[in-house]
Image (spheres, rainbow, N blue to C red):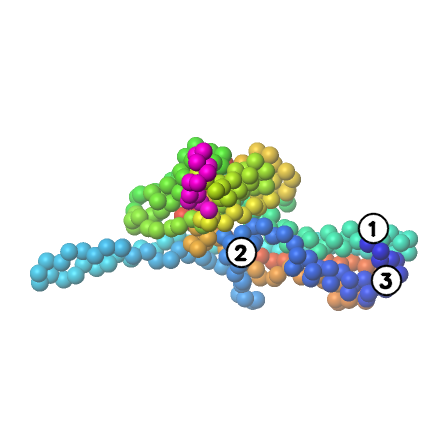
């Protein structure tokens, strides 16, 4: 970049930082947030830090025979599970030092600006992805050492073989049997779960149609999905004229942050994770109280920290997330 940052005044550099920040919000890869399974929601200002999400009310689906002269049977109404979401604030500050400015340390200043523009959107997407990364657990310890509650409304992990229902002792399973790597047969087993293990809170079979395959950025898994979706024939057949039933059936979403540790480092033990989801029935909420914002030296001070002569910039965001049920997603590790 051929810009000489050392010649910038504080207002000019601030303008550059703000412009870079806004550009980054539009151009950053936010795989999880844009996956189609995350529902963007907002919390109005001055309404607290909690928001409760609830399943829709389930009613029995079938009528009852009425004998002549008898009264009609009352329909059953069953409330579902609820999940409370709490917001928290993430921030990051950078300092453009006097030495950077007068010594022409343009690369260091550019790196600082880039870090500031990326950090909040990246953090939101990492937190969203970790709901799938740690889908077998009810909590995990995040990069700051805090315990994060990621249980769904029935107090179980997002991926569980015994998800509970509020109106019956029946349970449902959303773990693909054997946790297989992705293949045509594994996908068919996940589809079978949608057919046989999708129940309302009265235990009745209901319809959900999967439309999204979610994978990590593992190249082998990606290629397996692409081969299946783009094949001109049944992938298990040598007959090139055979119709591929999967041709336009699924959207493939690659989420690069699933196979990571809580700190965002590479975790190869999770590279084969994949999920089959019905995005239309997702109850995975991202609630934003404050969208990513930037504070510049002109906000509330005279532009330069007196003792250090630094120009300080800070970005932040306040948000929370919650998943109510595991009904809409099937999981495999």
Q: Which circle marks residue 107 in the picture?
A: 1
How many angstroms separate mark 1 from mark 2 (CA)?
35 Å
Element under label 1? helix
Residue at mark 2: 286
Image coordinates for residue 230, horizontal then vertical, percent: 50, 44
Identify the main secondary structure in magenta: loop
Q: Is residue 271 above or below residue 55?
A: above
Q: Quadrant of residue 91?
A: bottom right
Taking the image as drawn, is residue 265 in sight?
Answer: yes
Q: Earlier in the sequence, mark 1 or mark 3?
A: 3
Compared across the picture, whether 141 is left or right of 299 comes to left
Neighbours of disc 1 within 10 Å: few (<14), some (14-19), many (20+): some
Does residue 48 appear anywhere in the picture?
no
Residue range in magenta is 235-247
Identify the residue at image location x=61%, y=61%: 291
Horizontal side of 329 relative to 19 (left or right) equals left
Residue at image point 81% right, 66% down: 11
Nearer the observer: mark 3 or 2; the answer is 3
Is residue 241 in the magenta section? yes
Q: Secondary structure at mark 3?
A: loop
Residue closest to the eye, 17 or 246: 246
Q: Please tell me whether mark 1 or mark 2 is closer to you in this view.
A: 1
Dot 2, how many residues are within 10 Å of its Cα: few (below 14), some (14-19), or many (20+)?
Answer: many
**How crowded is the residue under tag 3: few (<14 C-alpha within 10 Å), some, or many (20+)?**
few
Residue 61 location (% of width, % of height): 27, 55
Q: Residue at x 68, y 57 (%)?
A: 24
Q: Measured from the top left, where is residue 228 in percent x and y? A: 49, 40
Number of dots carrying numbers: 3
- Which residue lies under the disc numbered 3? 8
Quarter of the figure that contains the N terminus: bottom right
Q: Residue at 59%, 38% (x, y): give it.
A: 219
């Amino acid at each position: 970049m051929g810009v000489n940052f050392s010649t910038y005044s504080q207002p000019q550099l601030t303008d550059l930082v703000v412009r870079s920040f806004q550009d980054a919000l539009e151009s950053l890869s936010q795989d999880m947030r844009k996956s189609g399974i995350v529902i963007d929601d907002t919390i109005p200002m001055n309404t607290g830090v909690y928001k409760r999400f609830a399943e829709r009310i389930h009613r029995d689906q079938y009528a009852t025979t009425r004998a002549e002269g008898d009264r009609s049977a009352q329909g059953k109404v069953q409330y579902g599970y609820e999940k409370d979401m709490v917001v928290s604030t993430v921030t990051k500050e950078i300092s453009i030092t006097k030495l950077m400015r007068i010594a022409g340390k343009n690369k260091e200043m550019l790196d600082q600006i880039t870090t500031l523009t990326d950090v909040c959107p990246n953090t939101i997407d990492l937190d969203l992805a970790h709901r799938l990364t740690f889908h077998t657990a009810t909590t995990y310890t995040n990069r700051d050492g805090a315990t994060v509650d990621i249980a769904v409304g029935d107090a179980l992990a997002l991926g569980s073989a015994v998800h509970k229902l509020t109106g019956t002792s029946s349970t449902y399973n959303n773990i693909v049997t054997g946790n297989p790597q992705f293949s045509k047969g594994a996908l068919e087993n996940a589809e079978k779960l949608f057919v046989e293990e999708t129940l309302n809170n009265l235990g009745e079979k209901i319809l959900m149609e999967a439309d999204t395959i979610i994978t990590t950025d593992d190249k082998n898994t990606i290629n397996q999905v692409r081969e299946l979706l783009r094949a001109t024939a049944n992938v298990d057949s040598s007959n090139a004229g055979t119709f591929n039933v999967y041709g336009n059936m699924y959207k493939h979403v690659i989420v690069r942050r699933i196979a990571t540790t809580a700190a965002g480092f590479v975790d190869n033990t999770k590279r084969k994770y994949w999920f089959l989801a019905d995005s239309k029935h997702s109850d995975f909420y991202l609630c934003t109280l404050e969208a990513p914002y930037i504070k510049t030296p002109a906000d509330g001070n005279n532009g330069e920290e007196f003792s250090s002569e630094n120009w300080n910039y800070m970005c932040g965001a306040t948000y929370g997330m919650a998943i109510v049920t595991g009904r809409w997603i099937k999981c495999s590790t």
